[in-house]
Amino acid sequence: MLGVWHVYAALFICCCMISVLTTMALTIGERVQRCLLVLVPRLFLAFFRLVSPGSKRPKHLPSIRNPLLTLSAVQLAEKIRRREVTSVEVVQAYIDRIQEVNPLLNALVKDRFSSALQEAAHADKIIEEENGGEEVLRNRFPLLGVPLSVKESFALQGMPNSGGLKSRARVLASVDAPPVALLKRAGAIPLGVTNTSELCMWMESSNHLYGITSNPYDLERMCGGSSGGEGSIIGGGASVIGIGSDIGGSIRMPCFFNGIFGHKPSQDVVSNDGQFPTCSGLQNDYLGSGPMCRYAEDLLPLLKIMAGPTADKLFLSKEVDLKKLSFFTVVDDGGSPLTSPVDKQLIAAQKRVAARIEADLGVTVKEVSFPQLKYSFQIWDTFLALPDKDGKPPQAFVEQMADGGSVWPVWELIKRIFGRSEHTVAAIGLALMESSHSSKLSQFILKQKEELQREMEDLLGTDGVLFYPSHPLLAPKHHHPLFTPYNIGYTGIQNILSLPVTQCPLGLSKERLPLGVQVVAGKFQDRLPLAVALYLEKTFGGWVDPGVI
């Protein structure tokens, strides 16, 4: 008899086929489309909830006991420079926390603890031998002795670099990706690499090489993707800073679901080199590599380090006066038939943000809407598939899955039902949906993007900030996004618009799951949402220890 997960795979096949058929039948009315793409998958989701086995694992993490784990990277670096604490003590504290919680989270997939302790001892020696004082150390090594976690898709010398692909299980990075190298040069000490979705193209960090990663606030829920391992390990208090990448929300969704801060920078600010999978077509224009952390004050220095000389484009040292900014809020995508309605608690949290800003700063937060947001998923999906300037299309997802071999998505689906495929249901479904894409570009979708780009840039200018839901739902249960894939439109649209976005936590829901909001600004105005993040942390409390019930 087939197990629950095999029944679940069969249900997802039905959802994929519905999507394919609907894509082909664009002349059918929106009411029928809503029925097929919303009602039917949700019926399958309801059935899946009924047949899913319960878990006997604990639902929450143990609380943090070591006070070193409650300090920001900026504070830790200062204490280490002042010899109030050693780097070895800090690194060991984080190793202890990882060993305590990672068996529950499955976030860190390969550690380098021995090397990290040696590097920490070396950092302490540098401080001991430095005669120039604390200021010299701050300028040369702003993160000296501070532990760091790294998304596995980034090359970290000597560590796995598979992108969650089972066929790359033995691939080790021979060099560091540029932003990783810059963080190490600043004195940060990598503890290991963290889990991703297969080929970094899904909303949940799960693959058949490392398994599935859980949310620190509820172990039965997902941590997001593709930087979900980073979100989980940082949100669980087992890392203070990390590095992620984002082509459709892969920094922002994990930060939202795990209650931490993250930033997707403006285009071409942080290098995207040294990652697997690599970009093709125009994808590099939409991919953003950026910082993830528990404390807002770490965002700007991390971004400055990761950007290197390119940071000059952002004028990060220029002071931001929040009272002189123009604030806007958009409560949803305008009612797309493809996406879930925004959770009422998220709407209420966003309204609280607007009310506090108006009360504290004496400004008006104007509610606006963009009808084009209704087509966010279609815009994102269309532009990721565009050819590069030389007319070369992006590498097919199925080719990336094959990794030099051959993969037939329909056969992989059949194998998955019987538990025989090396690929996840999500990856197979994406390959199947990709095969249904029309080769003819939709002029309507292209026009929607152009209009949205123009209207958004005109609104934001150089002093505008916009609040937008991070996702329509609170952190879903494991696997549930397979039935609501179009919700990625809430984050993916900002990638196509190439706008900087900071993800900010806003406390917890009644279910004790993280609330949050995206803070969007105009191109190269990254300092604006970073400044707003500091205000929101002070006002709403920022990250909350998931072990405190």
Image: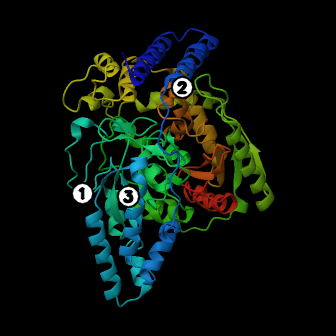
x, y (%) of residue 62?
A: 51, 56
Q: Residues within 10 Å of mark 3 (few under 14, many from 20)?
A: few
* Residue at mark 1 to residue at mark 3: CA–CA distance: 22 Å
460 or 255: nearer the eye? 255
Three-letter amino acid code at disc 1?
Answer: Gln
Residue at (45, 21) in percent of width and height: 441
Three-letter amino acid code at disc 3?
Answer: Gln
488 or 2: nearer the eye? 2
**179 relative position to 501: left or right:** left
Residue at (60, 55) in percent of width and height: 529
x, y (%) of residue 23?
A: 48, 15
Whether the residues at callouts 2 and 1 have beta carbons within 8 Å, the answer is no
**14 relative position to 461: left or right:** left
Residue 245, visible in the rendered structure: no
Quarter location, residue 487? top right
Looking at the image, is 341 positioned above or below residue 412?
Answer: below
Residue at the spot of label 3 = 99
Q: Residues within 10 Å of mark 1 (few under 14, many from 20)?
A: some
The label on residue 49 is 2
Residue at (61, 10) in percent of width and height: 32
* Residue at mark 2 to residue at mark 1: CA–CA distance: 42 Å
Q: Nearer the viewer, mark 2 or mark 1?
A: 2
The label on residue 157 is 1
Q: Secondary structure at mark 2?
A: helix
**219 relative position to 337: left or right:** left
Residue 380, visible in the rendered structure: yes
Check the picture and name the quadrant holding the N terminus.
top left
Q: Secondary structure at mark 1?
A: loop
* Residue at mark 2 to residue at mark 3: CA–CA distance: 31 Å
x, y (%) of residue 479?
A: 47, 31
Precedes in sequence: disc 1 or disc 3: 3
108 or 383: nearer the eye? 108
